[in-house]
Amino acid sequence: MSFELSSFFPPPRYLQMPAVGIDISDRSLKFVEIMEVKGELRLGRFGKRTLPEGLIQAGEIKNKEKLAEFIKTNFQEVTGSFVVLALPEEKAYVSHISLPKLKKEEIRDALELQLEEYIPLPASQAVFDYEVVSGEKEDHTDVVAVAFGRPLVENYLEVMKGAGLRPIVFELEAEALRRAVLPRQANGTKMIIDFGRTRTSFIIVSEGVVRFTSTVGVAGEGLDRAIGRALKVDAHEAERAKKEQGLVRTEKNKAIFNAILPIVSAIKDEMLRHMAYWKNHAEHLHGGNTEIDILYLSGGDSNLTGFSDYLSYELKVPVKLASPWVNITDFERYIPEIAHNESLYYATAIGLALRSRYIV
C-alpha cells in the first residue's frame, strides 16, 4: 500500500519512473538505486549517513529546514532524483475493514465514511490507501487499510522537495520490507522482524498482503547500553563487543550474554504476543492463514550472533536471516557490492527502489 502523490497533491506525471529508495529514521538516512542492465536488475547508487540528533524523534520531523539542508548537503549524489520514501512505521494505522459488496470505484468513498471508526484521526486529517483481500465471489468486500496523519505526510513531502529531491510515492515501511525480503511468489503467513537501532517492528504478511504491523522501542541501542553498563565501556566499545561476541553463552562471554538476554527475551515475548494475536484473530479475517510458518530477521542488528538460533528454539518456528536480494539476484551471475550483513541495514531502501522497478 502506497501513497502516490497523484491522490494527494497535483503530481508530475512520472509515477512509473525509476526512482531512488529512501529510508529515513530517527538516527540515519539510507538510499538505494536499482538499475536495469540488459534486462536484469543491478545495484546502482547507494549510501547512508547518520542524522544529527533531534531532527527526527519517534518518526516526527522536528526541524524541517535543518533536515532538508542536511540531506541537500550530504546526499548530493541523488539531488534531483525521483524518490520513493518510506513513512515511519510507528505513525501508521493499519486496519482490517469489512464493507458491503462494492464495485472497485466505490471502495475509497465507502472507506472514507468509515475510517474514523478505526483510526484516532478525522478523515479530513488522514491520508490513506487500501488493498482488497476478499475474493471476487464473496458477498462482502474486505480490505486492509493503512493511514497516516496528513500533517506528517506534508512535512516529509516538504523536506524532500526542500532537499532538491522529487518524491513520487510515499509507502508504508512494512510494504517495502515485504517486497525486499519475501520471495515474490511466497504464500502462507510470514512474520518479518525489523531489528533496528531505536525500534523493532513486527510485520505479519499473509498471502502476500501486509495484515498487521506493530513497533516497540526496544532495539540495538538498548543492547549497546546494556553491554556498556556491564563492561563499563563507552558506546563504541560496547557495539564492537556486541558484534564480536553476540548472544552466545560461554564462560568468556558470560557478562555480555547476561547483559543482553533480558532485552532479547523482551523481543521474543513481543513476538509470542503477536503470534498469539494473529492465531486468535486470523480466522475472522478473510483469507487469513492462522499459522505463521517462518520468521525473517531484518534490520542492522538482526545478524547478532546466536539471535536466530535463540528465537527458533524459544518460539518453535523456523527463523531465517533475511536476504534483501532475494528478488534481485541468485548470486550466480551477479554479486551486489553491499555485503550480505551490511545489506540488512538497507533492506527497506532496497524494497522502495524495487517498487519503482514494477515489483509489487
Image (tube, grey):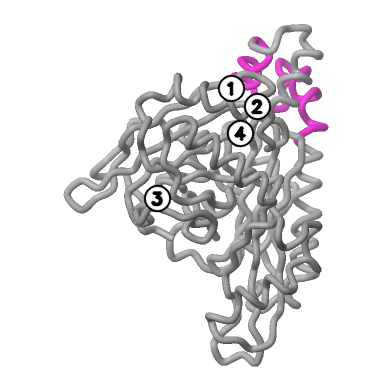
Instruction: State left or right for residue 299 relative to residue 54.
Output: left
Residue that appears at 81% across and 57% down:
120
The quarter of the picture where the N terminus appears is bottom right
Tell me the tag on residue 25.
Answer: 4
**Do the numbered discs 2 and 1 sit on residues whose CB atoms are within 8 Å?**
yes
Marker disc for residue 66: 1
Q: Spatial distance from mark 4 to mark 3, Cα to Cα?
A: 19 Å
Looking at the image, which residue sits at the far front? 10
Residue 3 part of the magenta segment:
no
Question: What residue sits 68% from the left and 14% below the top?
Answer: 238
Q: How many marks?
A: 4
Q: Which residues are magenta?
A: 237-264
Residue 196, image x, y percentages:
63, 34
- Which numbered mark, 3 or 1, is in the foreground of this view? 1
Foreground of the two, 131 or 41: 131
Q: Earlier in the sequence, mark 3 or mark 2?
A: 2
To which quarter of the image does residue 230 belong?
top right
User: How packed is label 3: few (under 14 Cα within 10 Å), some, or many (20 or more)?
Assistant: many
The residue under label 3 is 354
Q: Are marks 1 and 4 in contact (CB under 8 Å)?
A: no
Label pair 4/3, CB-CB below 8 angstroms: no
Crowding near the residue tagged with mark 4, few <14, some 14–19, many ≥20 C-alpha atoms within 10 Å:
many
Disc 4 residue type?
A: Ser
Q: Is residue 67 above or below residue 140?
A: above
Q: Which mark is residue 63?
A: 2
User: What's the amino acid at mark 3?
Assistant: Leu
Badge 1 crowding class, 10 Å Cα cut-off, few under 14, some 14 to 19, many 20 or more, is some
Disc 2 residue type (three-letter)? Asn
- Give the Cα separation between the discs numbered 2 and 1: 6 Å
Number of the front mark, 3 or 2: 2
The amino acid on which the numbered mark 1 sits, given as a three-letter code, is Lys
